[in-house]
Image (spheres, helix red, strand yellow):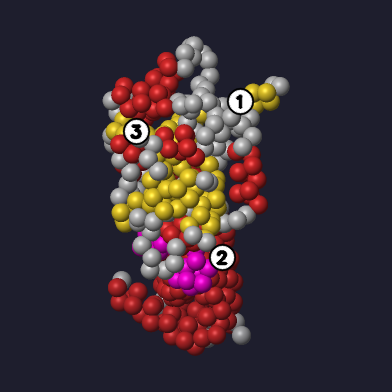
């Protein structure tokens, strides 16, 4: 049997070399199909990995708590428009929730920052020292502010890399320098480690962090920051002197802030497994504190990074499946092309088949020969397609900046799929060849 298969492979290769151009054109559909499958899967997996990494960069086991919504004239506004969360809520969560490791709270505003003759419009966040635990993001130059700074409402600031780039000259050490936020001088005590863009396309390094008490009493005053969202999600603004920033700043000045109110609370669970339990504990604590009756809707919203990650992964998976389905069509088209060419080959070699049967070849031998020829076409096309798919992924990654991740599984599956396509579409021509009548085949011109 092994000898028969090796002879069939030899005959198949001889036949392919005899018609090189036709063989190449026959394999083209499989080459494009396999290459497209690998490229599309690598793009999908790269995007999924990138989203996962960016979401993980937002914090460690983090849970986000947003204020509720407001209703005016029967119209409900978006989430976060009501002032339902307080500093005391955050402190109660930290004390009463056993599955919570750390808690911070924040308020936000957009303001012009000045250093000497340079200025920059950016997001100012008032946070607590626990921020660096929850976000797993601290300074790589200088230090972060401490609880005494929070208690005394100290005028200290920790700035992001984008602020350094736009306010200071290259080579300058920002630590120890004094910048002005609105009319207040702030001493820069630290520079945050670079984060880059998050999954929402926002520059996380375009941010200034100051103590919450300082922001509330000295910078934001009696004004409620605009609907810029929670620190853990936004992590910066589309900064620069833009009309969007100006309009947002104007909208900030139009609503008053109640003392002790916060825009959001960020919580870190003790472990990834404890996120669900921590969420339930937080909901129970807040409902009790807000005196919500059974059946009454929450006046707050709780989201975990797991929820965000699952939503992002679901979208990415759907897109990957769509791209993979489109790419797979090329393989099917390639299989149809192989079947057509093999049918032509059977017609051209009818007399040869008759001679082989006349000298003792059995029907299964003819069937095996044509199946091996078809399979050889598919596998060679698969090998070339793998090379093209990997090369295309690398080119897309470099030229278009798309994240790609080539997996061994996608290569193996593409190769197997190519082989299955070859066998499936090659069986009909092979079966037709094996069922030829020897006498009629010998008479064929």
Is residue 328 visible to us here? no
Residue depth check, mark 2 versus mark 1: number of the one nearer the observer: 1
Which label sits on residue 151? 3
Give the farthest residue toward the bottom: 18
Q: Residue at x 41, y 24 (%)?
A: 89
Q: Nearer the viewer, residue 70 or 344?
A: 70
- For numbered disc 3, what is the local secondary structure? helix
Can residue 344 be seen in the rendering of this structure?
A: yes
- Residue 101 location, quadrant: top left
**Secondary element at tag 1:** loop
Residue 54 versus residue 90: which sits nearer the camera? 90
Which residue has dot 1 on it?
70
The local secondary structure at tag 2 comes to helix
Label 3 and label 1: CA atoms lie apart by 32 Å
Q: Residue shown at 43%/80% (left/top)? A: 12
Residue at 61%, 37% in the rendered image: 253
Label 3 with label 1: CB-CB less than 8 Å: no
Relative image position of residue 69 (x, y in whole percent): 58, 27
Q: Which mark is residue 228?
A: none
Q: Which residue is mark 2?
A: 330
Q: Residue furthest right?
A: 73
Is residue 27 shown left or right of residue 94?
right
Between the C-alphas of marks 2 and 1, the distance is: 52 Å
- Figure quadrant of residue 103: top left
Residue stretch in magenta: 393-410
Q: Earlier in the sequence, mark 2 or mark 1?
A: 1
Q: Earlier in the sequence, mark 3 or mark 1?
A: 1
Q: Earlier in the sequence, mark 3 or mark 2?
A: 3
**Magenta span contains residue 404:** yes
Question: Would you call the spot at circle 2 few (<14 residues within 10 Å), some (14-19), or many (20 or more)?
Answer: many
What residue sits 49% from the left and 11% below the top?
Answer: 293
Q: Residue furthest top?
A: 293
């Amino acid at each position: 049997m092994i000898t028969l298969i090796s002879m069939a492979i030899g005959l198949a290769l001889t036949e392919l070399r005899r018609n090189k151009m036709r063989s190449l054109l026959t394999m083209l559909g499989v080459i494009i199909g396999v290459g497209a499958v690998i490229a599309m899967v690598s793009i999908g997996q790269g995007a999924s990995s990138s989203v996962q990494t960016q979401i993980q960069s937002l914090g460690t086991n983090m849970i986000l708590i947003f204020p509720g919504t407001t209703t005016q004239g029967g119209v409900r506004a978006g989430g976060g428009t009501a002032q339902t969360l307080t500093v005391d809520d955050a402190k109660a969560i930290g004390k009463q929730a056993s599955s919570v490791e750390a808690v911070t709270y924040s308020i936000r505003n957009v303001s012009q920052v000045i250093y000497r003759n340079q200025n920059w419009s950016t997001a100012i966040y008032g946070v607590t020292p626990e921020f660096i635990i929850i976000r797993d993001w601290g300074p790589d130059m200088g230090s972060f502010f401490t609880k005494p700074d929070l208690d005394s409402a100290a005028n200290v600031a920790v700035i992001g890399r984008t602020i350094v780039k736009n306010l200071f000259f290259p080579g300058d050490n920002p630590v120890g320098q004094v910048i002005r936020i609105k009319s207040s001088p702030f001493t820069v005590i630290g520079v945050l480690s670079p984060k880059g863009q998050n999954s929402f396309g926002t520059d996380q390094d375009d941010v200034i962090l100051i103590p919450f008490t300082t922001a509330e009493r000295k910078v934001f005053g009696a004004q409620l920051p605009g609907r810029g969202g929670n620190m853990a999600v936004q992590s910066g603004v589309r900064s620069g002197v833009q009309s969007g920033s100006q309009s947002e700043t104007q909208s900030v000045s139009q609503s008053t802030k109640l003392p002790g109110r916060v825009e959001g609370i960020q919580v870190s669970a003790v472990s990834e497994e404890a996120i669900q339990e921590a969420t339930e504990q937080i909901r129970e604590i807040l409902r009790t504190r807000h005196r919500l009756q059974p059946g009454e809707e929450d006046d707050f919203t709780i989201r975990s990074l797991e929820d965000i990650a699952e939503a992002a992964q679901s979208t990415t998976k759907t897109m990957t499946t769509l791209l993979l389905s489109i790419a797979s069509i090329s393989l099917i088209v390639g299989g149809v092309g192989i079947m057509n060419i093999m049918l032509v080959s059977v017609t051209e070699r009818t007399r040869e088949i008759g001679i082989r049967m006349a000298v003792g070849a059995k029907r299964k031998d003819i069937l095996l020969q044509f199946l091996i020829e078809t399979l050889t076409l598919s596998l060679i096309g698969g090998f070339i397609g793998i090379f093209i798919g990997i090369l295309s992924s690398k080119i897309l990654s470099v030229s278009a900046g798309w994240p790609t991740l080539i997996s061994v599984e996608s290569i193996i599956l593409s190769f197997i799929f190519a082989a299955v396509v070859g066998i499936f579409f090659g069986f009909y021509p092979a079966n037709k060849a094996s069922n030829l009548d020897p006498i009629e085949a010998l008479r064929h011109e």
